[in-house]
Amino acid sequence: MKEVWVYIEQEEGRIHPVSFELLGVAKRLAQELSGRVAGVLLGHLVDDLRGEVFAYGAERLYLVDHEVLAYYRHIPYAKALAELARKYRPEILLLGATPLGRDLAGGVATLLETGLTADVTELAIDKETGHLLMTRPAYGGNIMATIICPNHRPQMATVRPRIFPIPERAEARSGEVIKEEISLTEEEAKVKRVGFIPKEKTVNLEYAEVVVSGGKGLGGKEGFAKLRELANLLKGEVGASRLAVEAGWISYEHQVGQTGKTVRPKVYFAFGISGAIQHRAGMQNADFVIAVNLDPEAPIFQIADLGLIGDWKTVCEALIEAIKQERKAS
Ligand SMILES: Cc1cc2nc3c(=O)[nH]c(=O)nc-3n(C[C@H](O)[C@H](O)[C@H](O)COP(=O)(O)OP(=O)(O)OC[C@H]3O[C@@H](n4cnc5c(N)ncnc54)[C@H](O)[C@@H]3O)c2cc1C
């Protein structure tokens, strides 16, 4: 039976949500191939994560538990994943396009001598040939390229977080666990982690429910302080266009778009953002888009659910005031 594999990305025993997103899309692909979805989990003492993998739709779980896999290192992880793939021959292997997933996928594809498409934003099965159609932006996002890997297996892709929704969780589901022994040694790992310095403050843009974004139209750093005020009231995060980041008004981790983050909030505010295709690539999956722009011709209005032609600051301040009044009243 053809298998669609999802690499279950875990660090410190926590699964990255992109793995759940991929289990959802893998299910759809597997159905079209009359095959099944399997998760692949590598690590040490990660057995208790199996429930999560089944709850989000895997029918099988390949598990390699080894102390050399206690934390992520390219060589042992790539070796373990490649060996599993050689033995069980999946049709498709998907990884999240996270820093870890991108690092691992390149190594595995090279070991397996197969094709890999990076940073994919659409996946489908070609009805006639059964090949995986992997689509990603190319040439600065101005065209979408669909790439196939007709002769080599598995067909590999890294997929952007937040492109696909997290599927419904079904607690009661379970599946088959295949535990695999793979010989790995500390020496071959080559690198050792001597310490771990967590980022001081991480911006959780990708998984925020409200994103308040600003662009070049904000006119300066102070604009983002205003947006922060609104974002805090709505328990959201602040996003930005590339031009705002390039102007030095806010740091790169806030950038939304093709070369920044993909977001999928319930509400996306675009203040003073023209809506270039490279920006829209990162936010067009938002449930509801509110755009404020002086220019009625700005392309952002083509995808906005609510468009306000006007000065961003006036609207933002009025909104802050209105929310404060309402909170006071209730
Ligand atoms: C390979 C490549 C990758 C890229 N990746 C990204 C990416 O990841 N993210 C990204 O955002 N861009 C990206 N870009 C850049 C993108 O093409 C645009 O240049 C950028 O998104 C424009 O940013 P902006 O909308 O803030 O600025 P502008 O296009 O200059 O728009 C500013 C808007 O503000 C409006 N405005 C001005 N004053 C006010 C006011 N007082 N009130 C309300 N509105 C006002 C203007 O009418 C205008 O529409 C990429 C480009 C390339 C080539």
Image: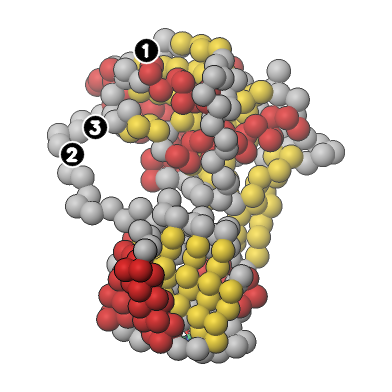
* Mark closer to the chain start, 3 or 2: 3
| Disc 3: CA contacts within 10 A as few (<14), some (14-19) or many (>=20) | few
The amino acid beneath tag 2 is Phe
Whether residue 246 is visible, yes or no, is no
* Mark closer to the chain start, 1 or 2: 1
Q: Look at the numbered discs 3 and 2 and tell me whether their residues touch, using CB distance below 8 Å.
A: no
Q: Nearer the viewer, residue 177 or 108?
A: 177
Whether residue 330 is visible, yes or no, is yes
Indicate the position of residue 231 as horizontal and vertical percent values.
Answer: 35, 66
Which numbered marker is on residue 200? none
Indicate the position of residue 300 as horizontal and vertical percent values.
Answer: 58, 76
| Disc 2: CA contacts within 10 A as few (<14), some (14-19) or many (>=20) | few
Secondary element at tag 1: loop
Which numbered marker is on residue 191? 3
Picture colour scheme:
secondary structure
Secondary element at tag 3: loop
Indicate the position of residue 59 as horizontal and vertical percent values.
Answer: 60, 20
- Residue picked out by circle 2: 196
Indicate the position of residue 283 as horizontal and vertical percent values.
Answer: 53, 62
The amino acid beneath tag 1 is Ser
Which numbered marker is on residue 183? 1
Tag in front: 1 or 2: 2
Residue at the image position 55 percent from the left and 82 percent from the top: 308
Q: CA distance from mark 3 to mark 2?
A: 14 Å
Most extreme residue toward the front, as rendered? 329
Q: CA distance from mark 1 to mark 3?
A: 17 Å
